[in-house]
Image: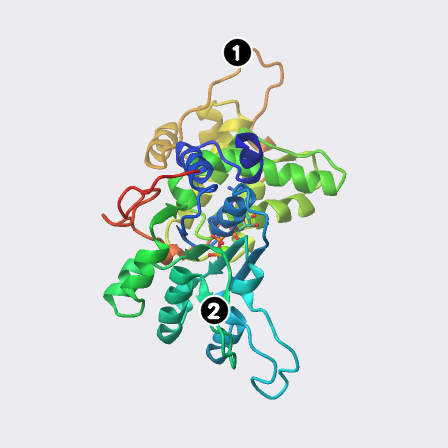
């Protein structure tokens, strides 16, 4: 199970390892789980893993709450009885009944209208609900996994989310950290996405060490989703067998990502490429940049670029004129990651917040 999970949720940072351990613990229990984290971080993947590892034989029914018009919620969740409204020509089950013996995944649960929140709470607590136009309650043994990229605790404070529902669904909170908090995963994820695309394109492509470093130092406001699409595009547009830092700089600038910090990102990528090209010879890097060697050191220090280890015996000698002009520079980029969820004392990553329910069965 551990191996299967490691193949599903890629990453070797301590944060992801801890998340996988928690998934293994809570998956077999019937406890509701709330998955929090910024957009593109992998919440849906976690929900999927929770069901796969639950051992539950029923269906996994996933739906995005925000995609359902307010007037359709009851029908979508609880189903309806034949004749309930014009066009209701037969009984319909609804998501909760479909998830009998399985899992219902309520994505973006913060979008649930307040009126529906109390009805959902009752359904979760009693495992019973009344279909639209029905005269009898229906029963379904479903497990709830919910996800939100907005802090539900803040929503409770702002009276946009019912505290009783949060207490019910948030017994176990799994927090998926933004990629910027686990830069250690970037290499593994980038390699994984690259190998997958390369396989589809019947090619062999690898990253240079400086390219991987350039990927690691980027902020990834769109998290893993953004990394995946950048890598997939790089594979399509690159011709050679290697992707270097400059390719990444160009790819990110072409995505028109705006905001502060991007200039530094471009400078770092350029420095890393030059250092790699000249085997760490800062004199050659300085001459390629048309600046003094001290300036190169200062820039390296300011941008947190470590001098690469120099290969001891090189036979090729390169000069500054070998380097093609690195023209593209990122204008700017915004940290769109304003949705990042800060850990609070009551809802923190991986903590069982209500009592200490026994995990597993
Ligand atoms: N650790 C991971 N390993 C492999 N793929 C991942 C990982 N994390 C995320 N992904 C991939 O990144 C993409 C975005 O992940 P996902 O849809 O789970 O994000 P999300 O947190 O639900 O985002 P949103 O809040 O925007 O719905 C998906 O293609 C997913 O498969
Ligand atoms: Mg999602």
Q: How many marks?
A: 2
Identity of the residue drawn at 28% across and 47% down: 353
Side (left or right) of 96 relative to 35: right
- Is residue 273 among the parts visible in the rendering? no
Q: How is the image coloured?
A: rainbow
Residue at left 39%, top 55%? 337
Between residues 188 and 273, which one lies in front from this camera angle? Answer: 188
Mark 1 packing: few (<14 Cα in 10 Å), some, or many (20+)?
few
From this view, report whether residue 202 is shown above or below residue 236: above
Q: Which mark is residue 66?
A: 2
Residue named by callout 1 = 312
Q: Quadrant of the N terminus?
A: top right
Kindly report which numbered mark, 2 or 1, lies closer to the viewer in this rendering: 2
SS at mark 2 in the image:
helix
Asked where in the image residue 292 lies, by quadrant, the reply is top left
Who is closer to the viewer here, 191 or 205? 191
Quadrant where the image shows the C terminus: top left
Coordinates of residue 69 in the picture (x, y in percent): 50, 77
- On the image, the x and y values in percent for residue 110 come to 39, 65
Q: Residue furthest right?
A: 202
Residue at x 38% of width, y 66% of height = 122
For residue 220, which numbered disc appears in the image? none
Residue 87 sits in which quadrant?
bottom right
Check contact, mark 2 vs mark 1: CB within 8 A. no
- Under circle 1, the secondary element is loop
Q: Is residue 233 above or below residue 19?
A: below
Q: CA distance from mark 2 to mark 1?
A: 59 Å
* Residue 359, quarter of the rendered image: top left
* Mark sitting earlier along the chain (2/1): 2
Circle 2 residues within 10 Å: few <14, some 14–19, many ≥20: some
């Amino acid at each position: 199970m551990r191996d299967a999970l490691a193949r599903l949720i890629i990453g070797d940072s301590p944060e992801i390892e801890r998340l996988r351990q928690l998934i293994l613990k809570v998956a077999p229990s019937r406890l509701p789980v709330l998955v929090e984290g910024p957009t593109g971080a992998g919440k849906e993947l976690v929900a999927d893993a929770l069901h796969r590892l639950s051992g539950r034989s029923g269906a996994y029914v996933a739906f995005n709450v925000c995609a359902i018009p307010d007037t359709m919620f009851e029908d979508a969740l609880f189903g309806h009885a034949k004749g309930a409204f014009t066009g209701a020509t037969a009984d319909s089950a609804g998501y909760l009944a479909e998830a009998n013996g399985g899992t219902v995944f309520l994505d973006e649960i913060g979008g649930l209208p307040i009126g529906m929140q109390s009805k959902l709470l009752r359904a979760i607590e009693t495992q019973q609900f009344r279909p639209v136009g029905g005269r009898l309650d229906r029963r379904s043994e479903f497990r709830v996994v919910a996800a939100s990229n907005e802090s539900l605790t803040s929503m409770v404070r702002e009276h946009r989310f019912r505290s009783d529902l949060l207490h019910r669904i948030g017994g176990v909170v799994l927090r998926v950290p933004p990629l910027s908090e686990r830069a250690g995963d970037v290499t593994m994820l980038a390699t994984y996405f690259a190998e997958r695309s390369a396989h589809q394109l019947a090619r062999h492509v690898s990253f240079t060490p400086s390219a991987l470093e350039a990927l690691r130092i980027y902020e990834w406001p769109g998290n893993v989703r953004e990394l995946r699409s950048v890598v997939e595009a790089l594979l399509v547009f690159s011709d050679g067998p290697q992707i270097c830092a400059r390719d990444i700089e160009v790819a990110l600038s072409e995505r028109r990502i705006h905001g502060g910090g991007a200039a530094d990102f471009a400078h770092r990528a350029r420095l890393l490429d030059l250092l790699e090209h000249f085997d760490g010879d800062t004199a050659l890097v300085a001459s390629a940049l048309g600046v003094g060697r001290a300036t190169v050191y200062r820039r390296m220090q300011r941008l947190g670029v470590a001098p690469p280890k120099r290969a001891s015996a090189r036979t090729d000698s390169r000069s500054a004129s070998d380097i093609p002009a690195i023209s593209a520079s990122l204008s700017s980029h915004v940290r769109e990651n304003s949705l990042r969820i800060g850990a609070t004392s009551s809802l923190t990553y991986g903590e069982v917040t209500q009592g200490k329910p026994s995990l597993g069965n």
